[in-house]
Image: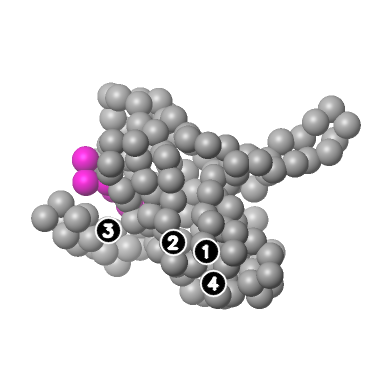
């Protein structure tokens, strides 16, 4: 019943032109989700968003699922003292009460490895966020141009 209610609320939010999706508990909100178009399927894709915990307890993002990619993971880009950037899996992401975690180019982001189909501008895909308490949130991620720098591009 909660999943059905969430689907109705999320669908209503999308039809009203908002960019927010709410978990069944209303504690977690995802805003401004977006991804760049890919060049085929030979290279990984990436997705970005803001995940806000409006609750009074910490929540932990433990996993991702999508039919678009066989290996969706949260990765962190870091740059060393020499200016060399590297990426690595970030593991679980704890989100403190009343805090926001931003997934953005050059920082934390969703890495979509082993794409099953090209990411085409103007399309979208479903991404499920999985939390340590067993809760899940399905987010529809619009695909922007290959040169996009944010959710408005």
**Disc on the earlier residue, 2 or 3:** 3
- Spatial CA span between label 2 and label 3: 17 Å
Q: Measuring 29% from the left and 67% from the top, which residue is drawn there?
A: 15
**Relative side of 84 to 67, left or right:** right
Q: Which residues are magenta?
A: 20-25
Q: Residues within 10 Å of mark 4 (few under 14, many from 20)?
A: some
Residue closest to the far left: 1
Q: Could you say which is closer to the camera, residue 106 or residue 80? A: 80
- Spatial CA span between label 3 and label 1: 23 Å
The secondary structure type at the circle numbered 4 is: loop
**Relative side of 70 to 39, left or right:** left
Where residue 142 sits in the image (x, y, percent)? 48, 65
Q: Measuring 39% from the left and 49% from the top, which residue is drawn there?
A: 129
Report the mark closest to the observer, 3 or 1. Answer: 1
Residue bearing mark 4: 116
Residue bearing mark 1: 69
The secondary structure type at the circle numbered 2 is: loop
Tag 4–tag 2 contact (CB < 8 Å): no
The secondary structure type at the circle numbered 3 is: helix
Tag 1–tag 4 contact (CB < 8 Å): yes
Q: Is residue 43 visible?
A: yes
Residue bearing mark 3: 10
The image quarter containing residue 52 is top left
């Amino acid at each position: 019943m909660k999943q059905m209610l969430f689907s109705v609320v999320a669908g209503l939010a999308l039809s009203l032109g908002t960019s927010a999706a709410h978990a069944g508990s209303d504690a977690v909100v995802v805003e401004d989700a977006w991804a760049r178009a890919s060049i085929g399927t030979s290279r990984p894709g990436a997705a970005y968003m803001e995940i806000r915990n409006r609750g009074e307890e910490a929540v932990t993002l433990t996993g991702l699922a999508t039919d678009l990619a066989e290996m969706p993971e949260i990765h962190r880009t870091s740059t060393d003292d020499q200016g060399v950037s590297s990426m690595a899996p970030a593991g679980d992401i704890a989100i403190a009460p009343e805090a926001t975690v931003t997934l953005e180019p050059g920082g934390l982001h969703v890495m979509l490895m082993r794409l099953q189909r090209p990411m085409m501008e103007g399309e979208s895909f479903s991404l499920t966020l999985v939390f340590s308490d067993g809760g899940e949130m399905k987010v529809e991620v619009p695909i922007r141009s290959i040169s996009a720098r944010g959710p408005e591009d």
